[in-house]
């Protein structure tokens, strides 16, 4: 698949997920989450997915958490800073919060390793 086709699939999956959330179709939502998990190691979702998900889901949506996690693990900080004005502010808050939590956990782990050595 070309990068454009992968981006289109991500966007289509996010749109479908938003629809399935409105229809309360748990089975379809779970299938979409599984598909995105499988795609994530090979390709990062485009930032357009952020707006689709954050416009079409509630604040406690598992897809929001998944999207933040995928983008955080992909290390998109520089790209995200470049397009900060084009993504939902709520996403930026979620992303920053999770990034800080990961940073603190990593620091604690490093501290325990140093103290235990």
Image (spheres, grey):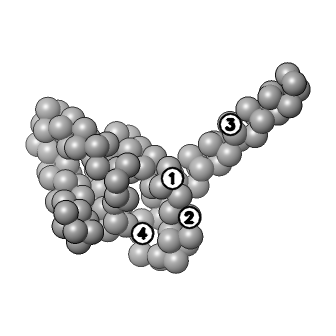
The residue where tag 1 is placed is: 72
Residue 82: image location, x then y, percent: 52, 77
> Distance between the Cα atoms at labels 4 and 1?
15 Å
Tell me which residue sits at (50%, 71%) in the image.
79
| Disc 1 and disc 2 in contact, CB within 8 angstroms | no
Left or right relative to 47: residue 116: right
Q: Which of marks 4 and 2 is in front?
A: 2
Q: How crowded is mark 2: few (under 14 residues within 10 Å), some or many (20 or more)?
A: some
On residue 87, the disc is 4
Tag 2 residue: 77
Residue shown at the point (27%, 69%) measured from the top left:
3
Q: In this view, does 87 lie above or below 53?
A: below
Relative depth, front residue between 110 and 82: 110
Q: Indicate the secondary structure of the residue bearing disc 2.
A: helix
Image quadrant occupied by the C terminus: top right
Mark with earlier residue (3, 1): 1
Residue 105's disc number: 3
The front one of 40 and 72 is 40
- Say which label, 4 or 2, has the lower sequence index: 2
Give the quadrant of residue 53.
bottom left
């Amino acid at each position: 698949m070309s990068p454009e086709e992968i981006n289109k699939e991500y966007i289509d999956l996010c749109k479908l997920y938003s629809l399935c959330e409105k229809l309360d179709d748990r089975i379809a939502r779970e299938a979409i989450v599984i598909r995105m998990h499988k795609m994530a190691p090979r390709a990062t979702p485009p930032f357009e997915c952020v707006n689709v998900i954050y416009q079409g889901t509630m604040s406690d949506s598992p897809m929001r958490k998944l999207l933040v996690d995928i983008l955080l693990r992909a290390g998109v900080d520089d790209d995200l800073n470049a397009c900060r004005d084009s993504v939902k502010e709520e996403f930026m808050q979620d992303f920053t919060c999770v990034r800080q939590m990961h940073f603190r956990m990593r620091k604690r782990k490093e501290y325990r390793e140093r103290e235990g050595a």
